[in-house]
Image (spheres, grey):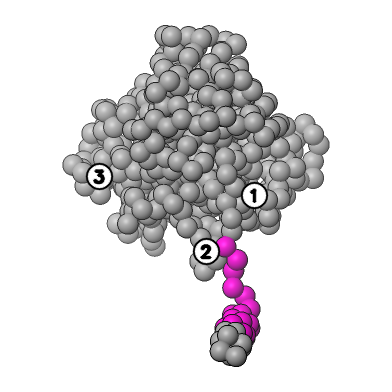
Amino acid sequence: MAFKLTLYVFILICTGISARSRRHLQWFPNVTPMIQPTIGEPWPRPQQMKTYATQFYLDPVTFRFNGSSASCDVLTQAFERYYLLIFESNSARGFGRKRRTVRGTPVLQGMAVKLEKPCQVFEQPSLEMNETYTLDVNSNYAQITATSQWAALRGLETFSQLVHDKNGILVINATSIVDWPRFPHRGVMLDTSLHYIGMPTLLKNLDAMEFNKFNVFHWHMVGDYSFPYQSESFPEMSNKGAFNPYTHIYSQLDIATVLAYARLRGIRVVPEFENPSHTLAWGKGQPGLLTPCYTHGKPDGTLGPIDPALNSTYDFMTRLFTELTRVFPDRYLAIGGSEIDFYCWQNDPEIRKFMKEKGFDDDFVKLEGYYYGRLFDVVSSLDRRVSVWEDSLDSGVKLHKEVIVQVWRGGDTDYPQRLANVTSQGYRTLLSSPWYLNYVQNPYSKQDWKTFYMVNPRNFTGSEKQKELVLGGEACLWTEYVDSTNVLSMLWPRASAVAERLWSAKDVHDVDEAIHRLTEHRCRMVGRGIPAQPATGPGYCKQEYMYT
């Protein structure tokens, strides 16, 4: 009798708990379910990948990387870097300090990297670099066969992501991958003029770019508010134009450090010195460069864009860009060209006199075209090419056909028409307009990455020849409200969505599938020291302890 009474009470309690649970769910019908991360899935998704049930155990004492070119500094340093990422990452912290045996699991003794093309001393990554590789893990020795050292880096990154923790043991599934990027230009544009970004943060961001297979750091270094570039030819420009000439500058040594760090990760550094607009900080250290503004026929004390009517302007630009080509090895320089306000040009009597002499009448687009023509001549004489924002083309300026036009207008709805317009004129182009990461579309859900993920840079009305002119794109972060304290969490993992879109096949666009891999990848980056913010709803990373 006592047993039956106890059982009856237990049933009542359980029923009550169940009822309360049901009522609780009714109160909160929109509770977001916790996303379960994948295990050992790569990001971005490879072009072709087969995974098998067989697993191999990685022993940190015996595992070795072997390359086909001992003199290749990019590979030798990558081997050291990836060994630490695999065996000392936070997902396996402490694993390398104590050997464990795994019965019945074969040991993966190492990774051999074979280059089809020997690396060259001091070789730089370029727009034309080949990043195709194959990765095979099907015996006790894995192998990457790569078309170049840059391709080998992408294969090593994929290999490191396949390795995962299994009850304190590092394992990898037998895998066969053939992989290459969909687009050759996969960039992150970061502004360092609205707020200064410190060197440690810049380098950590390059790490995150490598983890996501980005290959271009578009460095928008200077602007209206600051000129942090420490020029050897014009030292007064940072002395008077930087936020602080001692602490908020990029010295020649700083820049050399960024360039070397990026090169070892297969990342191009394309500097942007935007002009003729957004140059107010330039004028602080270079008197006479900017156009004086007039009101009612008199100077009003303000300054406008760079003065295009003075020969001294082009003498200055020649000296500055000659220095930039010595400092930055990439073939391309970004020269800006956005948001030019003609007001000060229109009201300057000397400029109007100059235009009359040139036969421009009152057509300030012709004046703009004249300025770009002379600037392009300067850059071409230095054996460099340029990229510009799309504004000049919108104005009707005729650009050289080798110019790369970056589409930044149109948001996430009108960009197809803008791409069609640029490519119909025969220009190669980059897409950025739907990938402005400083615009947080939904600050509550933080899941605007889904919008970024669904963009297709070649989804516009045009011929196949036009679509081939789309070289890729860039995730852009302007720093009005961003500095070293929050830039990495603003970028990652939201930029990861752009990374997969630019690397993976066009039919990889299932958000419901991607969300699980992105959850794992975000935690992977956290474990590698990148403070990537949560982006897929409630959950946790076991690597979070390093931030608590």
User: In 3D space, how far apart are the residues under numbered discs 3 and 1 (Cα atoms)?
Assistant: 39 Å
Q: Earlier in the sequence, mark 3 or mark 1?
A: 3
Q: Please tell me whether mark 2 or mark 1 is closer to you in this view.
A: 2
What x and y, as percent, mark residue 115?
A: 56, 13
Which picture quadrant has residue 347?
Answer: bottom left
Q: Nearer the viewer, mark 2 or mark 3?
A: 2
Identify which residue, 412 or 340, lies in the foreground: 412
Residues at discs 2 and 3 in contact (Cβ within 8 Å): no
Q: Is residue 70 above or below residue 510?
A: above
Looking at the rendering, in which quadrant would you find the N terminus? bottom right
Q: Amino acid at mark 3?
A: His
**Which mark, residue 248?**
3
x%, y% of residue 84? 39, 30
Query: Is label 2 in a helix, a strand or a loop?
Result: loop
| Magenta stretch in the rendered image | 11-34
Circle on res. 538: 2
How packed mark 1 is, by other alpha carbons closer than 10 Å (few <14, some 14-19, many 20 or more), is many
Which is nearer the N-term, disc 2 or disc 1?
A: 1
Q: Which mark is residue 514?
A: 1
Contact (CB < 8 A) between labels 3 and 1?
Answer: no
- Secondary element under disc 1, as helix, strand or loop, is helix
| Picture residue at 26% right of the left edge, 28% below the top | 253
Residue type marked 1: Ala
Quadrant of the rendering where the C terminus is positioned: bottom left
